[in-house]
Amino acid sequence: MRINVYSQEMTSEINTVEKVSNTGLTYSAVQIMLHSSPMLHHPPQDDDRSAVTFWLPKSPERREEIARAFEDMAAKVRAARPETGLD
């Protein structure tokens, strides 16, 4: 699966999420919030804004691997050609 998020949709808002499943297990995630239409309401109990959510693995080793991948992505963002992309 490929997900495209355009620069105009991105925000700097990053959230952590925890959900308890019907089996009693708690799952954790990090998400980057996307720009939403001003017509949408954002009540705290039902946040219907768009986001990209990354559900995290259980093991510390895999979590560290994912953290390093995000750090590598940040380095690539900083190193990308300045004249590309849109604001």
Image (tube, rainbow, N blue to C red):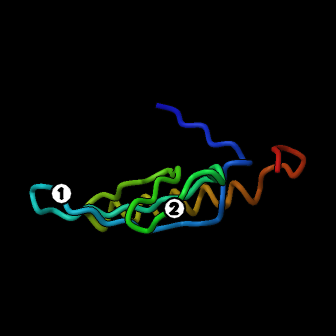
Residue at the spot 67% in from the left edge and 60% down from the top edge: 75
Q: Is residue 6 left or right of residue 67?
A: right
SS type, badge 2: loop
- Mark 1 to mark 2: distance in Å? 24 Å
Mark 1, mark 2: which one is toward the viewer?
2
Residue nearest the observer in this picture, 39 or 79: 39
77 or 40: which is nearer to us?
Answer: 40
Q: Give the number of the disc on residue 42.
A: 2
Q: Residue furthest top?
A: 1
Q: Is residue 10 above or below residue 43?
A: above
Q: Badges 1 and 2: C-beta atoms under 8 Å apart? A: no
Q: Residue at x 51, y 52 (%)?
A: 51
Q: Mark 1 is on which residue type?
A: Ser
The percent coordinates of residue 27 (x first, y second) are 26, 61
Of residues 9 and 86, the one drawn nearer to the viewer in this rendering: 9
Decide: is 2 above or below 9: above
Which residue shows up at 43% across the image and 68% down it? 44
Which residue sits furthest right? 83
- Dot 1 or dot 2: first in sequence order is 1
State the residue at coordinates (48%, 67%).
Answer: 15
Residue at the spot of label 1: 21
Q: Amino acid at mark 2?
A: His
Per the image, label 1 sits on a secondary structure element best described as loop
Q: How many neighbours does mark 2 have within 10 angstroms: few (below 14), some (14-19), or many (20 or more)? A: few
Q: Based on the displayed image, in which of its 4 quarters is residue 29 positioned?
A: bottom left
Q: Which mark is residue 10?
A: none
In the rendered structure, the answer to whether residue 25 lies left or right of residue 60 reads left
Q: Locate residue 58, reporting x and y percent.
A: 25, 61
Neighbor class of circle 1 (other Cα within 10 Å; few <14, some 14-19, many 20+) is few
Q: Position of residue 5 (x, y in %)?
A: 62, 42
